Image (cartoon, rainbow, N blue to C red):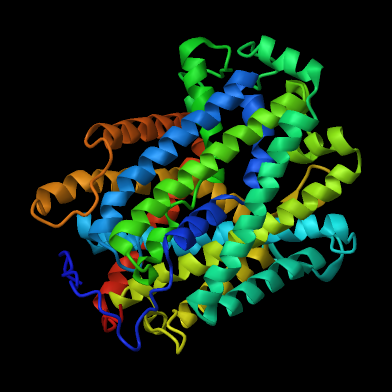
């Protein structure tokens, strides 16, 4: 495929066999909110508080995440309005740079980013269903682990089965049309938003702990029990120091940079509405507005949720919460053991709605790639309900594979434990996700130079300063991750770069599918 930009069809007229434009502004906002809120907000506060070492550090991390996420969403709005087509970020990168860059994003999204997140959320769903139904356990085997070499295995536990069944069900639901998919999304996003608001209300007003409030807010910036952050590779240890948040300005930069991994990942997926732009009623306006409204709502809820934790629990209890389940610890402090059940129900609702949004949106990128001849041809077609049914099946099948594959660890005593392959893969691509965000926002500058006369119904807020600040901040975080999370940063780059030869194979046999938008 030649490295040239694609002509963008100007007509928005709906074709009989094309996408159904059924997503309004409210629906789009619900897709953003629902895809962003999963299980992360209920657990990552523990790790962030250990890294930053203070109550103020916990809050500031989320405020910084909010500023980064909202500034990115406000910047993306220009691209969403300029290219209101299925595929979102894949299309933006293709048009700003070349088909190769779009493919590398779509490749990584399908291989790990979207599918790995869906797998993680599905197993999280099953794990919390197991709180209510103890027989749904990771240790009750249907198929005992079968070793695939020394480091990997495949297995099927009852917990894994429930996760796979969730994927099958939501994939099937979304093949029946976008109207049903958005209805499910609206119901479960509304329910999970109310659940999170309930947690915030209970933590700030009902479970107020005078001792915790005094300790946390009278010593807001006092660093306690901050964990050492070590260089990410042995060769770096001779010139990169082990550091904590108490280590001066550089220590704070490192601590907050590393802490952003958890908070940014919990606030990710805000760009998913762009994938569905071909199904938005007024895409040149509503995609950008959905991103803006959705991110503002979620970041506000996230900051208030962490404030609720600090009103309920002393910092040390947040840092040492069992299995990092801070929200469960907060409700346990208010209601006792019943709190764990309440939290389990809230997370079940949250993860179900999150996966519906991720499944709905993710298949549209595979569809857009196939239209360009860069993915399996069948995924570039729509079913009789006007949705990419085959792309949904491919996506769901790969998610199921990721759930079944396990990592295998043998300790010095010969005991074998099993982890989740998708968890390792997601750690690897956090760095790569930032690369794609930086490239996409830099694409605003590129496209203003390449297409100065193009119609821009929405222009990036605060251009050029807000997009530039995002790029600088994201590059600073990436620098910290290269030094202190090297073991996960470089494998992420390898996953992306593996897409280069795959791209050239696909591009040689490319037979673009007719446009049905």
Q: In which quarter of the image is residue 273?
A: bottom left
Q: Which residue is drawn at 48% across and 26% down?
A: 236
Q: Residue 270's spot in the image, x, y percent?
A: 46, 51
In this view, 46 is above or below 373 = above
In this view, 13 is above or below 114 = below
**Front one among 99 and 387:** 387
Q: Residue at x 88, y 38 (%)?
A: 335
In this view, 375 is above or below 431 = below
**Front one among 88 and 217:** 217
Is residue 375 left or right of 192 when viewed as pictured? left
Q: Residue 48's spot in the image, x, y percent?
A: 62, 30
Is residue 265 left or right of 450 when viewed as pictured? right
Q: Residue 213's spot in the image, x, y percent?
A: 73, 18
In this view, 242 is above or below 259 = above
Q: Residue 278's spot in the image, x, y percent?
A: 34, 70
Name the quadrant of the N terminus.
bottom left
Q: In which quarter of the image is residue 101?
A: bottom left
Residue 134 shows in the view = yes
Q: How many labels does the image show?
A: 0
Q: Which residue is drawn at 20% across and 75% down?
A: 11
Is residue 346 left or right of 472 when viewed as pictured? right
Q: Quadrant of residue 124?
A: bottom right
Residue 151 shows in the view = no
Q: Which residue is drawn at 11% across and 52% down?
A: 450
Name the quadrant of the C terminus.
bottom left
């Amino acid at each position: 495929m030649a490295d040239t930009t694609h002509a963008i069809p100007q007509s928005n007229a709906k074709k009989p066999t094309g996408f159904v434009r059924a997503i309004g502004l409210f629906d789009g906002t619900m897709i953003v909110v629902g895809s962003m809120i999963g299980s992360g907000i209920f657990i990552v506060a523990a790790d962030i508080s250990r890294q930053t070492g203070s109550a103020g550090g916990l809050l500031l991390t989320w405020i910084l995440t909010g500023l980064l996420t909202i500034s990115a969403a406000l910047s993306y709005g220009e691209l969403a309005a300029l290219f209101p087509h299925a595929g979102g970020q894949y299309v933006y990168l293709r048009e700003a740079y070349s088909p190769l860059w779009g493919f590398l994003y779509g490749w990584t999204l399908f291989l790990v980013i979207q599918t790995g997140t869906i797998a993680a959320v599905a197993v999280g769903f099953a794990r919390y269903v197991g709180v209510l139904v103890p027989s749904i356990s990771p240790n009750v085997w249907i198929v005992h682990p079968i070793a695939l070499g020394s480091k990997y295995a495949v297995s099927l536990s009852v917990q894994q089965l429930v996760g796979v069944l969730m994927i099958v069900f939501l994939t099937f639901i979304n093949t029946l049309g976008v109207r049903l998919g958005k209805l499910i999304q609206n119901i479960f996003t509304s329910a999970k938003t109310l659940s999170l608001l309930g947690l915030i209300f209970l933590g700030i007003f009902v479970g107020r702990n005078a001792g915790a409030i005094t300790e946390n807010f009278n010593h807001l910036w006092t660093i306690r029990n901050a964990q050492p952050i070590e260089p990410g590779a042995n060769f770096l240890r001779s010139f990169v120091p082990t550091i904590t948040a108490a280590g001066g300005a550089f220590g704070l930069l490192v601590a907050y940079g590393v802490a952003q991994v958890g908070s940014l990942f919990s606030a990710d997926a805000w760009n998913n509405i762009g994938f569905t732009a071909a199904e938005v009623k007024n895409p040149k306006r509503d995609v950008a507005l959905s991103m803006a409204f959705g991110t503002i709502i979620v970041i506000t809820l996230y900051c208030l949720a962490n404030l609720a934790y600090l009103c309920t629990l002393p910092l040390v209890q947040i840092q040492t919460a069992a299995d990092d389940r801070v929200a469960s610890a907060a409700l346990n402090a208010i209601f006792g053991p019943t709190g764990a059940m309440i939290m389990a129900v809230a997370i079940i609702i949250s993860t179900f709605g999150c996966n519906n949004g991720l499944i709905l949106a993710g298949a549209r990128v595979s569809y857009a790639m196939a239209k360009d001849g860069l993915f399996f041809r069948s995924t570039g077609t729509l079913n009789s309900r006007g949705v990419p049914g085959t792309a949904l099946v491919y996506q769901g099948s790969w998610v199921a594979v990721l759930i079944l594959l396990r990592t295998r660890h043998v300790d010095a005593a010969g005991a074998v434990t099993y982890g989740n392959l998708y968890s390792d893969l997601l750690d690897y691509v956090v760095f790569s996700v930032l690369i794609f965000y930086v490239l996409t926002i830099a694409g605003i500058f590129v496209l203003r130079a390449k297409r100065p006369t193009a119609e821009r119904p929405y222009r990036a807020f605060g251009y050029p300063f807000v997009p530039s600040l995002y790029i600088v901040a994201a590059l600073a975080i990436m620098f910290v991750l290269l030094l202190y999370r090297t073991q996960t940063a470089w494998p992420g780059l390898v996953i992306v770069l593996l897409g280069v030869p795959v791209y050239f194979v696909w591009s040689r046999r490319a037979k673009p599918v007719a446009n049905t938008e």
